[in-house]
Image (cartoon, coloured by chain):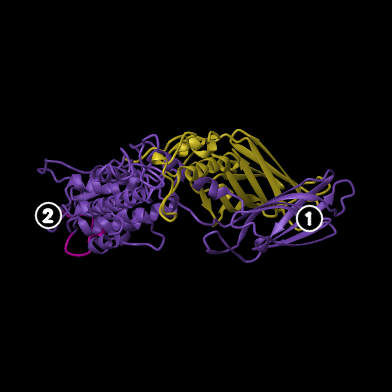
Chain colours: A yellow, B purple
């Protein structure tokens, strides 16, 4: 029977060192520390790993997506790279043909796209956990000064708008988007 | 896993208070993988006017030799990393940047950036004058994943369970206690800092090791828990291997082959499919009947019940629904399509083709969340025959 991991997946925002076997009372068996540095792990080393993983998990992005807007020939944006906590897509895909487990993306207008994330995601052990988007940050990857991207979110969607220095929507830009759980 | 000198590596997972349970280790693996996937390659704060990197954190290395070179003029800052870096374990890792975000920390100045394989260029702009401008900015850069890409890279396995043999305490401690009992009281009773203690510790760990070797032999007597003998089972069972296989992958592939060596009964086939397909396996689709007075659907044979001529390759049509094993499967929510298709079109086919009787045919079909609704079915009904026709 498949194992059920302790605790909840990272994007639940509940990460704790206790999920990983951390315990403030943890100690080496009979207080005998490592004898052979190449074969033994000490309790204080494991609790450090548990605490540091929990710390990293608390501030980690749920997703980092690098994409290109398709405005000249209007179409859904092209996702060049999608790094999600639940999987990576480095081959890229069309926003309106998202592979299972990756967000879809639709073009609203020039420089304006909306990503739609699933309400739940599943971790490597098959544990399903709701995703609540609590933040988003976007940057235009361009050689033109003044281009700017703003990201807003509502429920499972994140909308990114790209403008130039004058505040006018600008077409066909590359953007990197971070999603905070 | 107990910690310390009585419990040398490899770690043993158990749910006693002093250790780490299989459930905790599984969460550790899953979460580490999750944060590793979205973790930045580099995170830094830069002042462009002086071309100074004020703060730099690198995922692989923060050493001065692994930081980017910096050049800045007229609000345009270019950061160039070495094409590869060496990690803490002396592995040389190539750098390929795939995403970057920048935030200006200077009031009235915005920033954006572009990137190539190992270079990021940040451009600041005065929002009032619309002219290029220097600023202090915070930059995050992501590169292709480095290091672990699966839970198996951290010892994870969906079948992991708590260890039982040493769950009451490390074997080395039990042997240590025995050595105390065997030695007269004249010997030191201290459990640290004496030569007697050191000898007892060595004795305990040695005998614990020999006990573990016995356990290792038992565990490797089948592919189910095998480690060092996995290559043997691969050869013995003729299991297919792929370049990116982990030990867990090989065990998963050998396990059903081992079971089917007992014979392809319905029960053995089901259990083998559960092992091979895991969460993807939904169930068997079998056509069974005792009523043969009327020819069952899709049954055709030479000079008996003729099938459609379009299906006939010569000499009459052969087809038996009763001898066909349909396998209903579903693609796991967290699985990618390529892995799923490799599982179904290569690994599944390998096993069924080899271990089913020659007169038995098989195929698979996808099933969504509603098991009563089947998706596209391959090798069922007229599809392949029509294709041949």
Q: Can residue B331 be seen in this view?
A: yes
Q: Nearer the viewer, residue B165 or B247?
A: B165
Rendered image quadrant of residue B352: bottom left
Q: Which quadrant, please, contains the C terminus of chain A?
A: top right
Q: Which residue is drawn at 55% across and 35% down?
A: A13
Taking the image as shown, residue A176 lies to the left or right of residue B32, namely right
For the view shown, which residue lies furthest in the front direction?
Answer: B186
Taking the image as shown, residue B256 lies to the left or right of residue B116, namely left
| Residue B90, numbered label | none
Label 2, secondary structure: give it. loop
Q: Mark 2 lies on which chain?
A: B
To the question of a shared chain for discs 1 and 2, the answer is yes
Q: Which residue is drawn at 42% across and 42% down?
A: B25
Residue under circle 1?
B123
Residue under circle 2?
B304
Q: Nearer the viewer, residue B41 or B166?
A: B166
């Amino acid at each position: 029977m498949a194992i059920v991991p302790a605790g909840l997946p990272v994007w639940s925002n509940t990460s704790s060192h206790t999920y990983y076997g951390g315990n403030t009372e943890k100690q080496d068996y009979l207080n005998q520390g490592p004898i052979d540095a190449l074969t033994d792990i000490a309790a204080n080393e494991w609790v450090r790993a548990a605490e540091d993983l929990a710390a990293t998990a608390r501030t980690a992005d749920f997703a980092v997506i690098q994409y290109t807007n398709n405005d000249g020939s209007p179409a859904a944006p092209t996702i060049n790279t999608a790094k999600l906590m639940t999987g990576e897509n480095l081959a890229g895909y069309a926003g309106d043909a998202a592979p299972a487990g990756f967000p879809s993306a639709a073009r609203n207008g020039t420089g304006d796209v909306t990503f739609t994330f699933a309400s739940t995601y599943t971790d490597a052990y098959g544990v399903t956990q709701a995703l609540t988007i609590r933040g988003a940050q976007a940057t235009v990857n361009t050689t033109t000064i003044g281009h700017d991207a703003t990201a807003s979110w509502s429920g499972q969607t994140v909308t990114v708008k790209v403008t130039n220095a004058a505040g006018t929507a600008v077409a066909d830009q590359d953007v990197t988007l971070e999603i905070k759980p | 896993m107990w910690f310390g000198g009585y419990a040398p590596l490899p770690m043993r997972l158990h749910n006693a208070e002093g250790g780490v349970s299989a459930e905790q280790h599984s969460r550790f693996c899953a979460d580490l993988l999750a944060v590793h996937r979205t973790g930045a390659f580099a995170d830094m704060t830069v002042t462009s006017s002086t071309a100074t990197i004020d703060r730099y954190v690198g995922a692989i290395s923060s050493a001065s030799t692994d930081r980017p070179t910096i050049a800045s003029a007229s609000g345009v800052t270019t950061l160039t990393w070495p094409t590869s870096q060496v990690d803490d374990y002396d592995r040389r890792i190539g750098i390929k940047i795939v995403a970057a975000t920048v935030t200006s920390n200077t009031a009235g100045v915005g920033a954006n950036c572009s990137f190539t394989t190992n270079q990021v260029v940040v451009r600041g702009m005065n929002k009032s004058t619309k002219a290029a401008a220097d600023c202090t900015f915070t930059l995050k850069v992501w590169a292709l994943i480095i290091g672990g890409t699966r839970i198996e890279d951290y010892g994870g396995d969906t079948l992991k369970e708590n260890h039982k043999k040493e769950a009451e305490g490390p074997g080395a401690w039990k042997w240590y206690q025995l050595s105390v009992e065997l030695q007269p009281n004249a010997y030191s009773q201290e459990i640290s800092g004496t030569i007697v203690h050191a000898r007892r510790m060595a004795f305990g760990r040695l005998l614990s090791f020999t006990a573990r070797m016995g356990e290792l032999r038992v565990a490797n007597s089948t592919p189910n828990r095998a480690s060092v003998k996995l290559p043997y089972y691969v050869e013995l069972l003729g299991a297919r291997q792929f370049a990116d296989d982990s030990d867990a992958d090989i065990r998963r592939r050998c396990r059903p082959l081992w079971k089917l060596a007992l014979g392809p009964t319905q029960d053995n086939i089901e259990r083998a499919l559960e092992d091979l397909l895991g969460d993807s396996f939904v169930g068997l689709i079998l056509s069974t009947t005792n009523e043969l007075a009327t020819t069952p659907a899709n049954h055709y044979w030479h000079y008996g019940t003729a099938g459609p001529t379009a299906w006939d390759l010569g000499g009459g049509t052969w087809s038996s629904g009763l001898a066909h094993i349909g396998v209903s499967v579903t693609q796991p929510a967290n699985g990618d399509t390529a892995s799923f298709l490799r599982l179904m079109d290569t690994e599944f086919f390998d096993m069924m083709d080899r271990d089913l009787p020659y007169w038995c045919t098989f195929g698979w079909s996808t099933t969504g969340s509603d098991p009563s609704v089947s998706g596209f079915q391959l090798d069922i009904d007229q599809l392949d025959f029509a294709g041949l026709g």
